[in-house]
Image (spheres, coloured by chain):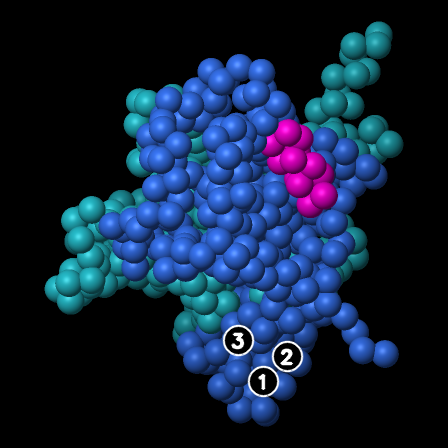
Chain colours: A cyan, B blue
């Protein structure tokens, strides 16, 4: 008895955690900002390293042209220049471009405050300095060390591995610096406003009758099916290639027939009217569902009746 | 189509669409040239339109099933949120605040950790010193072969003296860079970074560095060169060894947050400890740069023993004065 009780409770606990993609701004309306993965961040990082390395090499060539270096010290000076360019680059770029370096701009990712509050300058400085301690310095040490000092080599290797494990092991893909600064990195959303299907003027010619639906005919589908239909209707705006046209007509015919059968729409729909039928059905269905939603009857998909019963049984 | 014929959610959208478009334009403007360079009226509108958009989003989630509208509003509000809550501080102000207020305050707040760092180093030095007098061979155990530069129990007293009072072929910018990435800097970096992993590595490394120091000192005291070595070390060592101890203090602070987070979660505790620890690391880095400067330029130029003491401890006193008196509010 006890194990059967424990297992669902454990599962629910995992399921109840909020999705990592949701950020709560001070206004209290949750926003969806998908967390950037390790791969895309690595790509941004490599871009930034390339940029700073090129700058450092240019300066180094300039210095050696001015006879300020000797072959003995060129590596130390190179490392110093790389360091001197790199540290301010990250901090200033992220401060100036609101949490984006050039690499991050290229990859369309951005730093945000983890708790949804304002992004502070302190957090940006902190996360970039920790990047030094976490990645660059052990990496530099690893490059400069040799077999004579096995302890230090192993230590820096272990350090890098641990540093890399931290973002892989947590849900927000935060590195140590992110945890300390209270930030994480997200994909930048792109706002594109498509036209409202319901506001479009349907082509109603005089000789055709208006397509109307009865209330009970609209009780078969939920929001998911409605939005799938929306995607399909939006795709009709694009010009199809020659071969695809026939296939598209076939798809639409199947869908129309399926809907007719399901909702019990008796009149046959002539081929020329199929799109008009779908359009009218979309409008009627959306109006109906939105009205139900206003009355507190949210229908996620066509199985809404079953899930209602389950909820009632659960309570 | 007439307004009355539209369904409720389509009317909702039609009434607000112009504002959303304007907000979209303002967001693009703010992302392009920055909030600081925008007109006052535009910035004010950005903030108020953003709040309207969040309200619209909350309402749309309740009343509309139009996927395109929901997606657009969500993305638009998110972009506007990112603009409105962007960092407002300039780099210059940040640097100034660090030097005048936050760094000395952080140093004063975390004095127990820094003290612990110094204690580790001192205990290490004492142990190294005593062990050397017990048996000279301990020197070889502690000191990495490259570090001593040929100095050890086998070297003659004259050769030891010549290193202390001899000119070096290395000086200037190249030497500065070399010294900056020398042994002590590595130790400081490791001490700070490894502190996160439960304190122990930081304490061990600091203690070990103390051992080297103690053995080195003992070797020279044994040959009657104790005071000379102290002068040679003081000129940069006061700054450099303090930097290691401060880095150790920062590392310990992080390690303590991981080991004993108290009522907070571990990542939360790290977040809090990080505020001061990073300032400590920055101070340590600054001191290491200064130490490399002293080592590369001043140590070769100043050969007089008293002057070496005065410069080394004088610079140390300046650091101390900054930590003790900086960032205090005037009453």
Check the image and name the residue furthest to the left: A65
- The answer to which of A282 and B306 lies nearer the viewer is B306
Instruction: Name the image quarter holding residue B113.
Output: top right
| Pointer 1 residue | B43
**Badge 2 element:** helix
**Badge 1 element:** helix
Q: Chain of mark 1?
A: B
Comparing marks 1 and 3, which lies closer to the viewer?
3
Please state the horizontal and vertical placement of residue B292, each as a whole percent of the image: 42, 53
- Separation of marks 1 and 3 at Cα, in angstroms: 23 Å
Residues at circles 2 and 3 in contact by the CB criterion of under 8 Å? no
- The answer to which of B193 and B174 lies nearer the viewer is B174
| Crowd class of label 3 (few under 14; some 14 to 19; many from 20; radius 10 Å) | few
Q: Left or right of B144: which side holds B50?
A: right
Q: Earlier in the sequence, mark 2 or mark 3?
A: 2
Please state the horizontal and vertical placement of residue A30, each as a whole percent of the image: 67, 57
| Pointer 2 residue | B47
Residue A70 in view of the camera:
yes
- The structure residue drawn at horizontal position 52% and vertical position 72%, both measured from the top left corner, is B91
Q: Chain of mark 2?
A: B
Residue B92: which numbered mark, if any? Answer: 3
Residue A269 inside the magenta-drawn segment: no
Q: Which residues are magenta?
A: B114-126
- The structure residue drawn at horizontal position 50% and vertical position 67%, both measured from the top left corner, is A95
Q: Left or right of B178: which side holds B213?
A: right
| Crowd class of label 1 (few under 14; some 14 to 19; many from 20; radius 10 Å) | some
């Amino acid at each position: 008895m006890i194990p059967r009780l424990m297992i669902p409770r454990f599962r629910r606990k995992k399921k109840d955690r909020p999705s990592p993609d949701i950020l709560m701004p001070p206004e209290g309306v949750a926003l969806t900002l998908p967390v950037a993965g390790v791969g895309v961040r690595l790509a941004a990082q490599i871009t930034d390293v390339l940029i700073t390395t090129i700058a450092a090499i240019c300066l180094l060539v300039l210095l050696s042209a001015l006879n300020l270096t000797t072959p003995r010290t060129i590596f130390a000076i190179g490392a110093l220049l790389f360091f001197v360019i790199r540290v301010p680059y990250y901090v200033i770029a992220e401060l100036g471009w609101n949490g984006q370096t050039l690499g991050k701009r290229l990859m369309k990712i951005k730093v945000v405050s983890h708790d949804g509050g304002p992004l502070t300058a302190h957090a940006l400085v902190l996360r970039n300095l920790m990047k030094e301690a976490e990645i660059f310095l052990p990496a530099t040490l690893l490059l400069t060390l040799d077999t004579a000092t096995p302890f230090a080599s192993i230590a820096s290797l272990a350090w890098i591995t641990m540093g890399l494990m931290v973002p892989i092991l947590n849900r927000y893909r935060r590195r140590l610096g992110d945890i300390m600064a209270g930030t994480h990195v997200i994909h930048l959303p792109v706002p594109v406003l498509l036209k409202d299907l319901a506001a479009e003027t349907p082509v109603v010619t005089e000789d055709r009758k208006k397509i109307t639906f009865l209330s009970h005919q609209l009780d078969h589908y939920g929001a998911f099916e409605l939005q799938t239909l929306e995607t399909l209707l939006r795709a009709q705006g694009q010009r199809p290639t020659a071969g695809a046209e026939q296939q598209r007509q076939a798809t639409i015919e199947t869908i129309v027939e399926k809907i007719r059968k399901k909702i019990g729409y008796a009149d046959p729909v002539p081929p020329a009217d199929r799109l008009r039928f779908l359009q009218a059905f979309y409008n009627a269905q959306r109006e109906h569902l939105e009205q139900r939603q206003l009355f507190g009857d949210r229908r996620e998909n066509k199985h809404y009746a079953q899930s209602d019963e389950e909820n009632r049984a659960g309570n | 189509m007439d307004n009355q014929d539209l369904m409720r959610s389509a009317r909702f959208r039609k009434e607000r669409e112009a504002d959303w478009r304007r907000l979209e334009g303002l967001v693009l403007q703010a992302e392009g040239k920055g909030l600081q360079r925008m007109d006052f009226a535009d910035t004010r509108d950005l903030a108020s339109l953003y709040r309207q958009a969040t309200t619209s989003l909350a309402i749309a989630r309740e009343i509309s099933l139009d996927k395109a509208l929901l997606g657009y509003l969500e993305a638009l509000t998110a972009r506007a949120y990112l603009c409105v809550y962007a960092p407002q501080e300039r780099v210059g102000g940040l640097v100034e605040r660090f030097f005048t207020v936050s760094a000395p305050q952080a140093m004063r707040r975390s004095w127990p950790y820094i003290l612990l760092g110094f204690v580790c180093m001192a205990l290490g030095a004492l142990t190294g010193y005593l062990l050397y007098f017990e048996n000279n061979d301990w020197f070889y155990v502690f000191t990495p072969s490259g570090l001593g530069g040929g100095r050890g129990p086998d070297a003659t007293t004259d050769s030891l003296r010549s290193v202390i009072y001899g000119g070096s072929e290395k000086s200037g910018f190249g030497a500065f860079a070399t010294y900056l990435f020398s042994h002590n800097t590595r130790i400081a970096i490791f001490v700070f970074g490894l502190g996160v992993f439960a304190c122990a590595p930081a304490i061990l490394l600091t203690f070990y560095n103390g051992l080297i120091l103690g053995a080195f000192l003992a070797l020279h005291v044994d040959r009657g060169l104790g005071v000379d070595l102290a002068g040679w070390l003081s000129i940069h060592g006061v700054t450099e060894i303090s930097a290691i101890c401060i880095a150790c203090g920062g590392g310990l602070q992080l390690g303590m947050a991981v080991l004993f987070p108290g009522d907070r979660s571990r990542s939360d505790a790290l977040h809090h400890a990080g505020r001061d620890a990073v300032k400590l690391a920055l101070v340590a880095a600054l001191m290491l740069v200064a130490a490399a400067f002293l080592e590369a330029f001043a140590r070769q130029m100043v050969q007089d023993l008293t002057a070496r003491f005065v410069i080394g401890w004088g610079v140390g006193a300046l650091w101390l004065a900054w930590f003790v008196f900086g960032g205090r509010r005037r009453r």
